[in-house]
Image (cartoon, rainbow, N blue to C red):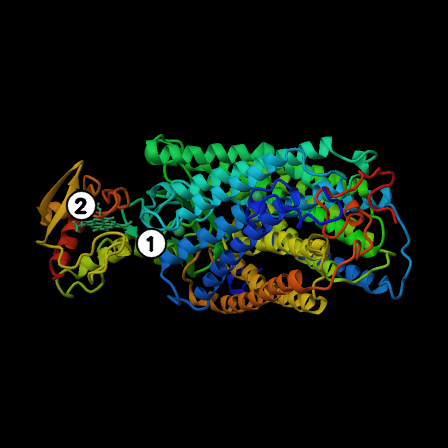
């Protein structure tokens, strides 16, 4: 095989599309995920915008209550299960993990392709719920019992879809764990591994260990709906709070499945654009592992008002505060990395700084939710919605865009347009703050979440928020259009446009099929300048 | 914390708001401080001003400091968070006024020990109020933001309760905070706090009929009952199909209902309506779902049902 051409040129099949959907090349699979996720993201954003337009004024604005309930459910299912959970690992993990550790591919390339197919299957099944039976599901993405048994809408496909998607996640996690254990380049000891692979490693373990729990839980719901076995429905002798426990035992660690790779990305971007080694490498690694571990024991903070014992409430609150520490340590190390650096203020660093700010707001408001007294006041209100959008969208989302701009030259061999990228960034941040900041206030005043209509006193905040949504969507449009046009017509990129030190900057842009002509031998730490 | 007028509307307000202040002000300081430092570094060490980076691997001392200080601060937050919640842990004090709050799709009912039933929570000032929380169909939540009170209402739970002491006269919003389906956002009412004497007078007043104006049109009391009990969330008066069949022209109409597996045609009469309200799932109107309407045995008396029937007859 000709080692000189990029992986785009290597074609096994005559029909173009088969070269993608049957490819076992980790880079093509990463891009397959990117395009699938982008498509779903556009749908999810439109649904979010529709909700915000509905809420611009009290009473009916553009849709009926039933439609609204279906819209927020679908928005949640798409954003959580189809986008942020696979998100960074599936796209950038696939494309870059093997290159960053000096390997030719992941450990199980065929399994890797299979997980994409399972992802597509799960997505299709979940989407079917929108068109079948008595209307789209209206339970919210949490499928809380017993409402999920009472509703007459089409629940089963949505639940089975989420179940199938779990397998995709498990397989990706497994694949990455084995790849990291077995395929690191000679000389790359654990403590010479870059931080993005480290974050994927921790994430892999969470995917592997906690996804089966939600799988079983969803199967129990299916059994209950089809065979009337009473696990969760009190009408059948079940316990609805048990459902919440099982659901959050997975879904809280899932938050770390989403955020850890985002943190890993930031740990790559900041050293590169400071031209400086990461401050406290070991502390950053240790905090990654600690977050993954302690994150298992805090799920109860979603349930302070559900009627748990006071002791349980006390303990979950304590654990929640402990898990905040490693995240704070990371923030300090990132900022310290910039100290006495030689900072090259480019768009990926803009996103990293945006990440830091929005993630700090998300994390600090998380403290309000960790403390019992304050959580009881804002639980199930707009405050919680604002908080997790700051963490998920402001954190994972901005890290994703940061990664997109950072590795764009590597993935496409082209440069994006710098000035449009900046316009997109600023529009995004302004829209984001306008959209979500007022929701903190609305929540403290008591406006419940999942609310189709509201009392007059909540009107002001909602107007600002809806206006912010429009700005935010404009920002997203600019960012996406800029990236798409640049991928086609951008200036040619060099091998190493940012003077990065990790291995992906030593291979061609875009890489060849097998990434490296000869497998490199690693002698230095990952960020030694 | 948020509204001057709300201050000390209940015994919880002070503790909760203190926790808010502590957490939010520490957070705010960190946010502003770190953001400034970050932007300052970006400016100061920009490659134009600082062309050569100084390589620093890290510092154990700093790691210890910035693990230790936040740890102390979050423990402080944890402590005040718990302390603010503490007053309502444990059982309600003796002599508390006991009220049972019953939630169903999509309204609240408050049942008093003397048999009084209301859709608004009337409570006396300065006396502990214990709310026994029940839900009949799905999970609901009872939240009175001004009191800093919130608790889920979980179906199947027998002995779940919360308590507080209202300390201010007035009318306060009471919301359902747990998503419960179609009309979740319309499931709200109010808590009305009255001085003890005024409350006693209200409490003892047995004559209080569902509507003030008894001389109104025939069935007016029935209409009030339908609205107060929340039937109108699922049944319309104008022919629109909501969750349940419309009440328009219902009396005397012929309906096909499913009784177990078989389908039978019935004529809507007193007997049928009574059964539909007290045992709604015995016969299901064709085209509707079982299990959505639950029995009103606990909420409505036979006399109430008579009043409702009287009103339904007027809906031609
Ligand atoms: Cu959580
Ligand atoms: Cu509700």
User: What number is the disc on residue B291?
Assistant: none
Residue B133 percent location from the top left of the image: 39, 43
**Residue at (61, 43) in percent of width and height:** A12
Please tell me whether mark 1 sits on a helix, a strand or a loop: helix
Residue A28 seen in render: yes
Q: Is residue A25 left or right of residue A121?
A: right
Name the N-terminal-most of marks 2 and 1.
1
**Residue at (34, 51) in percent of width and height:** A135
Please tell me whether mark 2 sits on a helix, a strand or a loop: helix
The quadrant in which residue A326 appears is top right
- Which image quarter holds the C terminus of chain B? bottom left
Q: Is residue B309 left or right of residue A349?
A: left
Residue A296 seen in render: no
How packed mark 1 is, by other alpha carbons closer than 10 Å (few <14, some 14-19, many 20 or more), is few
| A208 over B233 or under it: above or below | above
Residue A266 percent location from the top left of the image: 72, 51
Q: In the depicted view, which residue is nearer to us: B238 or A192?
A: A192
- Which image quarter holds the N terminus of chain B? bottom right
Residue A196 percent location from the top left of the image: 72, 44
Marks 2 & 1, CB-CB < 8 Å contact: no
- Of the residues tagged 2 and 1, which is closer to the observer? 2
Q: Chain of mark 2?
A: B
The residue under label 1 is B200
How packed mark 2 is, by other alpha carbons closer than 10 Å (few <14, some 14-19, many 20 or more), is many
Q: How many marks?
A: 2
Q: CA distance from mark 2 to mark 1?
A: 36 Å
Residue A28 percent location from the top left of the image: 63, 46
The residue under label 2 is B276
């Amino acid at each position: 095989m000709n080692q000189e051409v990029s992986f785009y040129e290597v074609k096994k099949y005559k029909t173009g599309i088969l070269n993608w959907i049957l490819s076992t090349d980790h880079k093509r699979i990463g891009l397959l995920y990117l395009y699938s996720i982008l498509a779903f993201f556009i749908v999810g954003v439109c649904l979010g915008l529709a909700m915000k337009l509905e809420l611009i004024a009290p009473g009916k604005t553009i849709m009926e209550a039933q439609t609204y309930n279906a819209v927020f459910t679908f928005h949640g299912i798409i954003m959580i299960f189809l986008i942020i959970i696979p998100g960074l690992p599936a796209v950038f993990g696939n494309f870059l993990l093997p290159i960053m550790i000096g390997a030719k591919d992941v450990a199980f390339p065929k399994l890797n392709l299979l997980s994409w197919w399972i992802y597509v299957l799960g997505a299709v099944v979940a989407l079917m719920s929108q068109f079948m039976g008595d209307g789209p599901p209206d339970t919210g993405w949490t499928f809380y019992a017993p409402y999920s048994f009472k509703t007459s809408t089409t629940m089963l496909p949505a639940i089975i879809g989420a179940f199938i998607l779990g397998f995709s996640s498990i397989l990706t996690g497994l694949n990455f764990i084995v790849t990291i254990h077995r395929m690191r380049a000679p000389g790359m000891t654990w403590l010479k591994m870059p931080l993005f692979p480290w974050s994927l490693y921790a994430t892999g373990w969470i995917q592997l260990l906690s996804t089966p729990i939600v799988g079983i839980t969803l199967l129990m719901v299916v059994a209950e709906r089809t065979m009337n076995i009473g696990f969760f429905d009190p009408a059948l002798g079940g316990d609805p709070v048990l459902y919440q426990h099982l659901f959050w035992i997975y879904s809280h660690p899932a938050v770390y499945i989403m955020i850890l790779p985002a943190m890993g990305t930031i740990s790559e971007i900041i050293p590169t654009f400071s031209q400086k080694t990461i401050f406290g490498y070991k502390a950053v690694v240790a905090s990654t592992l600690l977050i993954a571990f302690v994150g298992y024991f805090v799920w109860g903070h979603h349930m302070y008002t559900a009627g748990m014992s006071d002791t349980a409430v006390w303990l979950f609150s304590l654990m929640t505060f402990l898990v905040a520490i490693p995240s704070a340590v990371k923030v300090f190390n990132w900022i310290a990395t910039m100290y006495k650096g030689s900072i090259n203020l480019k768009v990926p660093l803009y996103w990293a700084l945006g990440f830091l700010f929005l993630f700090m707001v998300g994390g600090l408001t998380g403290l309000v939710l960790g403390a019992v007294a304050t959580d009881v006041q804002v639980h199930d209100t707009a405050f919680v919605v604002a908080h997790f959008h700051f963490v998920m969208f402001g954190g994972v989302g901005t890290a994703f865009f940061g990664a997109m701009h950072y590795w764009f030259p590597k993935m496409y061999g082209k440069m994006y347009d710098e000035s449009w990228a900046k316009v997109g960034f600023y529009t995004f941040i302004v829209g984001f703050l306008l959209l979500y900041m007022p929701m903190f206030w609305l929540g403290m005043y008591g406006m419940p979440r999942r609310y189709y209509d509201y009392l007059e006193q909540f009107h002001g905040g909602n107007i600002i928020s809806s206006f912010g949504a429009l700005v935010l969507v404009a920002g997203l449009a600019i960012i996406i259009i800029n990236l798409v046009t640049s991928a086609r017509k951008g200036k040619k990129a060099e091998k190493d446009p940012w003077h990065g030190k990790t291995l992906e900057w030593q291979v061609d842009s875009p890489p060849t099929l097998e990434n490296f002509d000869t497998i490199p031998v690693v002698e230095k730490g990952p960020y030694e300048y | 914390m948020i509204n001057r007028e709300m201050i000390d509307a209940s015994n919880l307000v002070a503790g909760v708001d203190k926790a808010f202040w502590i957490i939010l002000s520490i957070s705010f300081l960190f946010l502003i401080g770190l953001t400034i430092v970050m932007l300052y570094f970006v400016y100061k060490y920009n490659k134009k001003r600082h062309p050569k980076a100084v390589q620093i691997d890290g510092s154990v001392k700093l790691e210890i400091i910035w693990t230790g200080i936040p740890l102390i601060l979050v423990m402080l937050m944890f402590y005040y968070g718990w302390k603010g919640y503490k007053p309502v842990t444990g059982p309600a004090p003796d002599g508390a006024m006991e009220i049972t709050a019953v939630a169903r799709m999509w309204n609240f009912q408050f049942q008093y020990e003397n048999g009084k039933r209301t859709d608004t929570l009337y409570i006396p000032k300065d006396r502990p109020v214990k709310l026994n929380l029940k839900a009949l169909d799905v999970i609901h939540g009872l939240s009175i933001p001004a009191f800093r009170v919130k608790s889920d209402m979980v179906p199947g739970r027998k002995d779940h309760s919360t308590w507080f002491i209202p300390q201010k006269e007035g009318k306060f919003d009471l919301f359902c905070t747990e998503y419960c389906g179609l009309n979740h956002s319309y499931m709200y009412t109010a808590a009305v706090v009255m001085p003890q004497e005024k409350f006693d007078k209200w409490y003892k007043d047995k004559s209080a009929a569902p509507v003030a104006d008894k001389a109104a049109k025939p069935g007016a009391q029935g209409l009030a009952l339908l609205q107060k009990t929340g039937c109108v969330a699922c049944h319309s008066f104008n022919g629109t199909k909501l969750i349940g069949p419309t009440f328009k022209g219902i009396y005397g109409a012929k309906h096909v209902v499913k009784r177990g597996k078989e389908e039978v045609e019935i004529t809507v009469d007193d007997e049928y309506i009574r059964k539909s309200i007290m045992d709604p799932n015995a016969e299901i109107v064709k085209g509707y779902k079982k299990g959505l309407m639950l029995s009103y045995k606990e909420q409505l008396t036979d006399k109430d049902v008579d009043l409702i029937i009287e009103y339904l007859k007027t809906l031609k």
